[in-house]
Image: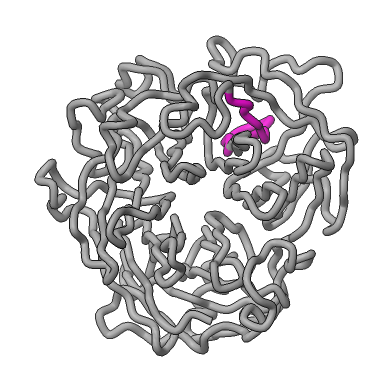
Amino acid sequence: MSATRRQILSRTGASVAGIAFSGALSELFTGSASAAGRGGYGPLVPDPAGLLDLPRGFRYTVLSRQGDPLRSGEGLVPSNPDGMGAFTGRRGRVHLVRNHENRVTGAIGVPVVQGLTYDPAAKGGCTALALDARNDVLGERVALAGTAVNCAGGPTPWDTWLTCEETEDRAGTNGYTKDHGYVFEVDGADPHRTGAVPLTAMGRFQHEAVAVDPRSGIVYETEDAFDRPFGLFYRFLPERPLGGTGSLRAGGALEAMRVPGAPDLSLIQETGASFGGVEWVPVPDPLATRTPIRLQDFGPRGITHAQKLEGCYWGGRAVYFVSSFARAADGSAGTHFGQVWKYEPHRRRLTLVVVFGPGTDIRLPGESPDNICLAPHGGLMVCEDGGGAQYVYGLTRHGEVYAMARGAQNTGTPEDPEWGEFAGVTFAPDGRTMYVNCYRPGTTFAVTGPWH
């Protein structure tokens, strides 16, 4: 979405916008149809404090800001908060685990803590906040350090967080002392219980997000590769499925998805397009010791690729994953402005259920979806990742799009404003609070109000 179009939208204070995508939206959503169909919460009200614009009746609390001291005394709150998960704690507490997508320069790194650090030369990792029932911060500490470019991830059925490194850098690159590109497990309540152990059997590649099938324990993984032939969609078959904290260290088998008749998902443009007989092909070298996985030899029939594979979540009996966009100019086989795919393991069937895209009306959102979460009250929350004004949008099952939040922290100038993207949108286990990060300047919000 162009900056001009976003800036116009921000000036209109639009609430419910016309639909800018098509597809079978109802199957993505939870909650009652009546609640999901009420069309949002009204226009956004400018925040006098200049931090976060919300609908009337909603309020936010700033839980944490980059550069402030961590309450543990371990150092400063790191930069670039990204993916995030919320977990139930004892006595009504919520444990919030937050990624920090830090590279080697230009960021406040996650402090090095003994027993929680993988590679002291890397600045990424996770922090964990402990909140009470009123969202007062009871504690804030390092949960994982020494990892790189921690982008997204996903929760496990046993209430831990899987954080993903979106890089393939090896030891000796950018000053790193160890290879990167792994998944790590983080226990927000007791980080030392999980430590800083890479789950190497889950593959070494540019990870984005994961989703766990709560019935089988199979872990699905997206790859956001930055160059051709772009990423793959994977599944990991653990040796000890649903074994609880630490069970993923027991190893397993990594496989990549092959869709007969679809070598590149960007070529599929029609919602409802469906492919049966999906195959899962063993990955020749999950550690990518010589060749990145997406470039390895998967046999004469090849493997299925897609650009910008990002969000991934489990719903009902299927896993959903997002392709944020595809551009022929980047080398993609096709062009689109965002897709949501549904894979049904019991049917071995892949279906394109939503296609995002720009409309001629400047009020239409719906381009480059990134982090997505199911809202417990019905509907979907989407963090868009583009230029100009930045929003968290809600989508109802009836196809209505509404603005739920707008970033008000201008990191540019009055003449040339810029706003940091949103990331990590998630809900408290009781559904009463939405947590979301502003990527830059790094700020973590708790949003409460009259949720439908």
* Quarter assignment of residue 52: bottom left
Q: Is residue 284 above or below residue 133?
A: above
Q: Residue at x 58, y 46 (%)?
A: 310
State which region is magenta.
224-238
* Quarter assignment of residue 279: top right
Residue extending furthest toward the left: 73
Q: Residue at x 83, y 59 (%)?
A: 271
235 inside magenta stretch: yes
Q: Main secondary structure of the magenta part?
A: loop
Residue 244, how many percent across, how many down?
46, 34
- The type of colouring in the image is one colour
Residue 37, how many percent across, how many down?
67, 82
- Which corner quadrant holds the N terminus? bottom right
Q: In the rendered view, does 9 fall on the left or right side of 131?
A: right
Residue extending furthest toward the front: 91
Q: Residue at x 75, y 45 (%)?
A: 343
Residue 377, how many percent across, how many down?
55, 73
Q: Is residue 311 above or below residue 337?
A: above
Q: In the rendered view, does 239 fall on the left or right side of 342?
A: left
Q: Residue at x 43, y 45 (%)?
A: 159
Q: In the rendered view, does 369 fall on the left or right side of 267?
A: left
